[in-house]
Amino acid sequence: MKGEKLRNLSFFLSPMIIMVGLFYLIPLIFTIYISFTKMRNWNIERYLTEIVGFYNYQRLFHMFQHDPLMRTVLLTTIVFVGITLIINVFGGLLLALGTFFINESSASAIRLLWLLPRMSPIAVYSLVWYYFFHGSNIGTLNSILMKFGVISQPVPWGQIVPWGAWSIIIFVNGLVGVSFGMIVFTSALNQIPKELVIAARVDGASAWQISRKILVPMMKWHFLYVLTWQFLSLLTTYPHLFLLVQWDLVSRDYGTTLALYVYNTAFGRGEQDQGLAAAAAVLLSIIGILGGFVTLKVLQFEKMIHEPRGDIE
Amino acid sequence: MKGKVGILLAMVVLFGVIASGCIGSQETSETKTTSVELTGDFVKDVLAIGKALESNGVSEVKFSAWGSGDPNSVMRVYGIVEAARRINKVWEENGVNVRITITDTHYVASFQDAYQEYLSKQPLGQAGDFFVNSYAFLPTLADEGYILDITEYANAYKNVIEDFYPSLIEASKFNGKLYGLPQDTEARPLYIRKDVAAKIGFNLEGIEEKVKNGEFTWSDVYYWAKKAKESGVEWGLIHRKGSAHPDLIQFIFAFGGKLYNEDSGKLVVDVPAVYKWLYVEWKFAQDGLLPKDIMSWDWAKQIHPAIVEGRTLFDIGGTWYWTEWQTKEYYGKEGTPRPLKPEEVQAWFAYTLFPAGEKGLKPVTLSQPFVWMINSKAGQQNPKYDELKDLYHKLAFLMIIKASDPDINAIHSVISAHLPVRKEAAKLISDEKWLNDLKNLNLDLDPQVKDNIKDIVATTVHPINAKFLADVSYMLEYTKLAPAHPKYPALADIFKEAVDKVLRGEMTPEEGVNYIIQKINADPELAQNVEVVGEIPRDWKFP
């Protein structure tokens, strides 16, 4: 009987286990391994077997101690992930609740509008904001403000450090990420029995009261899912940041997060230092694992996965 | 019956012996050549390789060419296409039944992007067989074994190698070995707007000589830039942005500094020269003569329009600007943006060397030669690669020798405003008849090549442009090269950051220098490769 159960489990779980192993576990193990080699310039034949122990980690920590940019990278990562996470989660929640109380056709149009940033190619989307925030009079924002006499000289928004640069990267990524929460929360809201809302309406409850007392408490697990997912996603995202920094729209110092630093170190310089980048990536993974663990613990994830009562063996 | 079987068996054995003898004798009499010694006689070598390939059953050799750069520099890949055609012609005329096919001409605008793509695809065997890019990447590619050491091959072709300018051949070497052939080079003139100069009473007559003699220095540039600003011109000076490599490091050389110590093989941060560079930039920016945010200006919408519309007196640019201004719509003063005409560029711009930092020093210019490099796995997509590798590699070398033909090099120079790398090519550029033939595409070129360059030829081939190239050629005598060192790009990045911070006023020049040193010391690997020499001069004044 046990053997049969194991066989059944293996049959159904094997695709998932293979996927996780192939695309998550092996790359992680490989990254850890590379961080102990002198790998650079993609030269696998030459460096893959050249083990250098903790050399890359020592070098990385030396840089953290002595390179002012490295401290800025960490600070930027904390601010970027923290604030964008709040925007993404609560923005998604607000959008879902907002569209819940209006008619379906308007709600669909609004949802589609917020999905546009995610559907646009990254380069096109970034280019729009490059010209919008450009620090000269060719920048749309500057020209509008100058036209209305709000400013007399163009403002180099992305070069005002730290908050100018941070605001732009948070704004651009926030717009992309907010749609994820919106979809999950909208889906969750649609699962809540309509009778509850109708009954509350009959009792004279306002939209705010219905949201606070009924809808939000019933979406706790979705909230937890969006929060954890978005946290890990923001920690490792870099494509929009890469372009905005590459195009000199935002200050390199305050536009570089740890994920972008890893990318630039591995693939973006004259000499591509994949060993050092792998060490930084391991650090990033540790932060991600710890952060995810803390989030799940604080929001009591284990309560969601306890065994259901009344199951028949 | 038994007798018949015996006879049959005896015949089979006899046949087998005779057949094996025949096969054996065929093997010894037709030994296939898998290696050919290069003699320096191009036709002879090409034929020898062709015949060797043919005898090994190869009838088609496939190669791909990767190049990068400004839109007018497409000869960086079509030069290879043309070389293939010329070799095919030799084979055809001599009855050798082998043809070279260029399977891919991959050309991208950003040479940094092209380099990154090459790095990632070379180990996979998917990168181009020919790679044209900046010599700045050559040390890393050579060090990793990604490109072919052609020193031995080149020894047989001394007659061709000697026609290249020696400094460019030196730039194609790493650790004393030759890893490529120069494809083009350029100078970075200081452009001066003639109309703005006339407005402020700045007499440009003999300016080239004054700069050459070190009489006109950066203090004079500052003086006239300030005059221009006071007269209502928007800027005194515009310069390039992006990585400080290679443009702005001209300041280091103009202030008598150096970037490389030949004895130790280490990069150098020459503190006095770097300090003076940062001070000049800081002074210009603080006094409003140079935009504080120039390092984040947009090329097409800000930098070039500011220059071609005469909103600055001086510009530190490159020779290729000359034709770029004629092909791109940067001039928007009359409403709809349009390219400049050759006559306008000639009438509006004077050009000189990059002036000396101060009296007693020399002017400079800077070159960043592009180099034909051969993939160390060149020919990999062809049959019997392991066996015939030597033939494929030598053929690839002969192709870059052919792609360096004076006429191919001269075409590239004229249409892209880069300087020729061979003396023979320089002669062609000043030949009016040849220029006319190029204008009408009345040259012996592959139809594919003609088709791909016809629009560029129509807009750029002009006596004014040829004269410009002839005029600026002397600058190569003053040229400096950034060090060919694998760690140089990392140092250049730090220079760029420091210049940006100083220009914006976030740091004083002194703080900028300290920032550079701090950044170098923060990376133990970089620190091992860089020497910091000298101290900040305390009694130095500018202007």
Image (cartoon, coloured by chain):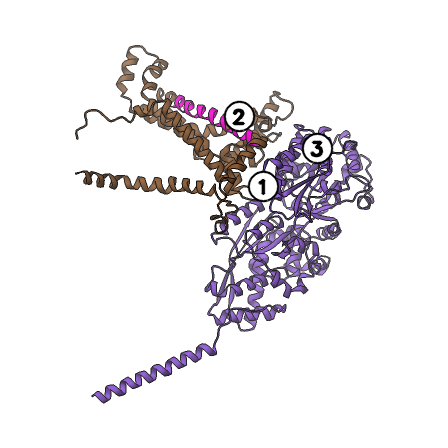
Mark 1 or mark 3, whichever is nearer to me = 1
Tell me, for residue A167, which label it has, or none: 2
Image quadrant where one finds the C terminus of chain A: top left
Q: Residue at (19%, 40%) from the top-left corner?
A: A4
Q: What element carries label 2?
A: helix
Residue lying at the far front of the rendered structure: A53
In screen coordinates, is B438 left or right of B103? Answer: right
**Picture colour for chain B:** purple
Task: Give the spatial CA distance, label 2 vs label 1.
Answer: 34 Å
Q: Is mark 3 on a helix, strand or loop?
A: loop
Residue B201 in view (yes/no): yes
- Residue B434 % position (x, y): 69, 60
Q: Quadrant of residue A219?
A: top left
The residue closer to the viewer here, A158 or B376, is: B376
Q: In which quarter of the image is residue B373?
A: bottom right
**Three-letter code, disc 2:** Ser
What's the chain of the residue with tag 2? A
**Three-letter code, disc 3:** Leu
- Residue A290 % position (x, y): 41, 29
**Picture colour for chain A:** brown
- Residue A185 % position (x, y): 35, 25
Say which residue label 1 marks: B525
Question: Which contiguous range is marked in magenta?
Answer: A69-96
Say which residue label 3 marks: B290
- Residue B313 % position (x, y): 74, 37
